[in-house]
């Protein structure tokens, strides 16, 4: 039998259908890889070997009946800020080190309903705050292509697990870069979905006006299969939209591709630029028209994001008070319990975000920070609106450089934040964006960012599948 | 540079205990980050309109049954008694 863990969802599904192997065979092959590689890579925070094999057996029964969907029996990994009932959910924080999820997130429930096999929970920056996965309280995830480098964050564990064949696909969440950036660094496909396209019920909240769950997969075709299952209206999430995913074939001939000139400025690594321009040239060769566009708000988008995100996060994290669940440190009075539990439970970056958020929301500063940021956010939305009147799709680099060294940016928060410069505008506008692996610099993968208008995931995915 | 007192004041508002080393590092980090935010002073003024897509999400005023996970939620609390979550006396 060839290496089962190299198969895509589509290929694995075919194999299951033809009875070449079973879901238990697949699951065992992945568990084997996790045992072999994950000591070094650290993509998983928790591996549910027993549960996965049980799910695989159930899937095999369903497969025998020959009435089964694409995801049935296919092993996946779930970012550890998404709840899976009865499994620990830590958000890579000491605060939730022993917390066991009391229910399934809607996305997990939808996967389970389709017969998915959940291998385990993957590493992330604590509470998804970060771009390198180094902010995990349980150690960084290493990049499978070069273990001295970061996997990217915050969904670094999910990206590394898929890249190193330790899961067929994974779920992640993207607030500012967190699916696309690690997908780009690890050389896989990652899709940040439209705000509202996928329910966030059961996702540990980072910034509620921007958080979105999405797939990380070996290719765009697989990402599409996952999106179809996890997307759509959910009564448990008032922000979820009446969205039914429909495949849509885009003709590359005549496609208008917008290149924001802000994406190709001084900060862009020359080698990354070469890879990105060569990738776009391939669409031009198929008859696409490339149009340079201006997105003046992009200059301000990162500052805007790093006001809005910590502001919302500081409010969301107020729930971790040592009373309801999670870490509780004894204190003399109630205030003391709050202070000590938060002081001991949260790591450095989480504390920084709480402090930034509390500062910008505090009396006297609100207008000059939070209100100003909301204005800039409106500017970003307007820029995208105007751009999509002229072009069908927008492209550029996901990150201005390839994966950096572990430790390189760790002590310099601002330089870490700057890694998100090309990805945050997409979140602020709520539009979907995908990272497509289009080349390498040495061993290090480079991702092309493909951005569409609201709820046009089908367009993005169709374009991505036509890149050769 | 943002002062030690200011960091301590914000930390207290956030109910966050910081060690003296953490306060020092926070002074430096917050100052750099807040300086970066000054960039926004250059951004043009614009009026915020709430768009149609943002109000779309209001739901009907109706009762939607939710899952009963009360016991599980209480079980997750660090300190509890007789089906109640215990807290320190407030007054």
Image: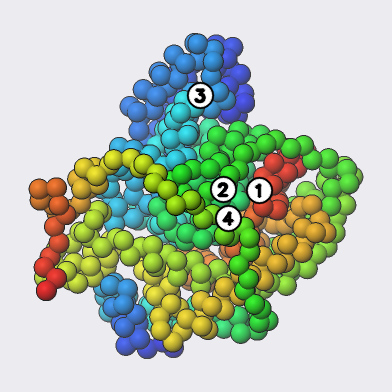
Asked where in the image residue A427 lies, by quadrant, the reply is bottom right
The residue singled out by tag 3 in the image is A72
Circle 3 residues within 10 Å: few <14, some 14–19, many ≥20: many
The count of marks equals 4
- Left or right, B49 with reference to A108: right
Q: Are marks 4 and 2 in contact (CB under 8 Å)?
A: yes
Which of pointers 1 and 3 lies earlier in the amino acid sequence?
A: 3
Q: Secondary structure at mark 3?
A: loop
Are discs 3 and 4 located on one and the same chain?
no
Read off the chain for label 2.
Answer: A
Distance between mark 1 and mark 2 Cα atoms: 10 Å
Q: Are marks 1 and 2 in contact (CB under 8 Å)?
A: yes
| Residue under the image location 63 percent in, 71 percent down | B49
Give the CA distance from mark 2 to mark 3. 26 Å
Vertical position of residue A41 compared to residue A323: above or below: above
Q: Residue at x 58, y 55 (%)?
A: B56
Q: Evaluate whether residue A15 shows in this view.
A: yes
Rounded to the nearest whole Å, what is the CA distance between mark 3 and mark 4?
A: 34 Å
Disc 1: which residue: A455
Q: Nearer the viewer, mark 2 or mark 3?
A: 2
Image depth: mark 4 or mark 2 in front: 4
Sort mark 1 into few (<14), some (14-19) or many (20+) by Cα contacts within 10 Å.
Answer: many
Q: CA distance from mark 4 to mark 2?
A: 9 Å
- Mark 1–mark 3 Cα distance, whole angstroms, equals 26 Å
**Residue B56's disc number:** 4
Q: Which residue is mark 2?
A: A241
Question: Upstream in the sequence, badge 2 or badge 3?
Answer: 3
Identify the image's colour scheme: rainbow, by chain, secondary structure or one colour.
rainbow
Same chain assignment for discs 1 and 2: yes
Q: Is residue A427 left or right of residue A254?
A: left
| Secondary structure at numbered mark 4 | loop
């Amino acid at each position: 039998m060839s290496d089962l863990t190299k198969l895509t969802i589509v290929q694995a599904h075919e194999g299951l259908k033809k009875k070449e192997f079973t879901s238990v065979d697949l699951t065992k092959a992945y568990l084997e890889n996790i045992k072999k590689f994950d000591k070094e890579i650290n993509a998983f925070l928790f591996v549910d070997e027993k549960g996965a094999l049980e799910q695989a057996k159930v899937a095999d029964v369903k497969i025998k009946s020959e009435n089964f969907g694409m995801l049935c029996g296919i092993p996946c990994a779930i970012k550890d800020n998404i709840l899976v009932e009865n499994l620990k959910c830590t958000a890579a924080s000491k605060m939730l080190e022993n917390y066991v999820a009391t229910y399934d997130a809607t996305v997990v429930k939808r996967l389970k309903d389709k017969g998915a096999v959940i291998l385990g929970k993957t590493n992330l920056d604590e509470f998804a705050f970060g771009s390198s996965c180094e902010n995990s309280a349980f150690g960084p995830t290493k990049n499978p292509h070069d273990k001295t480098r970061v996997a990217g964050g915050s969904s670094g564990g999910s990206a590394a697990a898929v890249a190193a064949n330790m899961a067929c696909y994974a779920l992640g969440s993207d607030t500012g870069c967190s699916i696309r950036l690690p997908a780009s660094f690890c050389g896989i496909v990652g899709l940040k979905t439209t705000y509202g396209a996928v329910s966030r019920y059961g996702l540990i909240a980072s910034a509620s006006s921007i958080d979105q769950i999405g797939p990380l997969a070996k290719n765009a075709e697989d990402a599409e299969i996952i999106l179809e299952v996890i997307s759509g209206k959910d009564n448990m999430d008032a922000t979820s939209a009446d969205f039914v995913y429909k495949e849509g074939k885009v003709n590359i001939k005549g496609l208008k591709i917008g290149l924001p000139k802000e994406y190709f400025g001084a900060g862009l690594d020359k080698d990354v630029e070469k890879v990105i321009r060569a990738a776009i040239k391939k669409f031009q060769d198929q008859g696409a028209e490339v149009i340079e566009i201006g997105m003046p708000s992009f200059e301000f988008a990162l500052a805007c994001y790093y006001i809005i995100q910590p502001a919302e996060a500081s409010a969301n994290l107020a729930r971790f008070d040592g009373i309801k669940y999670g870490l509780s440190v004894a204190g003399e009075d109630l205030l003391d319990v709050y202070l000590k539990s938060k002081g001991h439970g949260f790591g450095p970056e989480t504390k920084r975000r709480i402090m930034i958020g509390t500062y910008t929301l505090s009396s006297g500063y609100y207008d000059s920070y939070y209100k100003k940021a909301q204005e800039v956010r409106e500017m970003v939305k307007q820029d995208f609106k105007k751009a999509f009147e002229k072009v069908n799709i927008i492209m550029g680099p996901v990150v201005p450089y390839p994966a950096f060294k572990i430790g390189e940016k760790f002590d310099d928060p601002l330089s870490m934040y700057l890694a998100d410069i090309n990805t945050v505008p997409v979140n602020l506008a709520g539009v979907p964006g995908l990272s497509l692996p289009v080349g390498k610099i040495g061993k290090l993968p480079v991702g092309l960012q493909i951005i569409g208008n609201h709820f046009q995931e089908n367009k993005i995915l169709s374009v991505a599948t036509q890149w050769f | 540079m943002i002062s030690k007192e200011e960091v301590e004041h914000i930390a207290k508002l956030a109910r966050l205990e910081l060690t003296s080393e953490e306060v020092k590092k926070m002074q430096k980090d917050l100052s750099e980050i807040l300086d970066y935010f000054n960039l926004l002073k250059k951004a043009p003024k614009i009026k915020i309109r709430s768009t149609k897509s943002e109000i779309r999400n209001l739901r009907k005023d109706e009762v939607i049954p939710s899952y009963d996970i009360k016991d599980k939620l209480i079980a997750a609390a660090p300190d509890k008694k007789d089906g109640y979550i215990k807290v320190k006396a407030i007054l």
